[in-house]
Image (cartoon, helix red, strand yellow):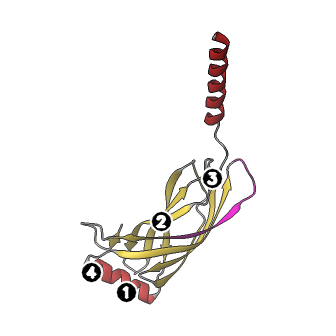
Amino acid sequence: MKSILKLSLAAIAVLLLVSCTSARRVSPPATAIQQLAVQANGDWALDLRLHNYSSVSMRFDTVRLEVSVDEHVAGTLQATPAISIGPTSADVVRVTLKPDGMARIAVADALASRRSLAYRLAGTVTATPVEESKPREFEVDDHSSLNPAPGLDGVLR
């Protein structure tokens, strides 16, 4: 009986050790607009949130995204953040964009009428797992919405 108990405890200990060792998993990142602020010259200052869903730290090298608001193409967002983001964490980078006319009007209308604004980010994010030297290119196609920020003129969050 004691040997069966010892064998069972040893098996449980091995299973716990195996389950605790995390498998190295690299997953596609996600992108989102955390804040869109209309500048005095009409350009947009975007706080772009980069989310690392991997189980390892990733260095985000380049971002190239087509931005659309209310189904109007705003332009191409290009950035070289060169930041490392830990496993299952996120960080924000500031990027400016000179939006196309219809997108500019859509944002102005959303701000004036205090309504939400749908957006889409589609393109590529290049990131490198910290333990590797070869960058990986990920296709992203993320969409969400922004709302006017109370008390902040020209800002959507």
Q: Which residue is mark 2?
A: 32
Between 3 and 118, which is closer to the camera in this rendering?
Answer: 3
Residue picked out by circle 3: 58
Say which amino acid is labelled 1: Ile
Give the spatial CA distance, label 1 vs label 2.
21 Å
Residue drawn at x 63%, y 54% is: 59
- Residue 54 drawn in magenta: no
Q: Which mark sits nearer the N-terminus, 1 or 2? A: 2
Q: Residue at left 43%, top 89%? A: 101
- The mark nearer the N terminus, 4 or 2, is 2
Gap between marks 2 and 3, in whole Å?
A: 17 Å
Q: Could you tell me residue 112's position as x and y percent?
A: 26, 80
The percent position of residue 114, horizontal first and vertical second, equals: 26, 76
Badge 1 or badge 4: first in the primary sequence: 1
Along the polypeptide, which appears first: circle 4 or circle 3?
3
Q: Label 3 neighbourhood size at 10 Å, few (<14), some (14-19), many (20+)?
A: many
Secondary structure, mark 1, is helix
Q: In this figure, which residue is indicated by the disc labeled 1?
A: 105
Distance of label 1 from label 4 (alpha carbons): 10 Å
Report the magenta residues as a range.
131-142
Q: Are marks 3 and 1 in contact (CB under 8 Å)?
A: no
Residue wearing tag 4: 112
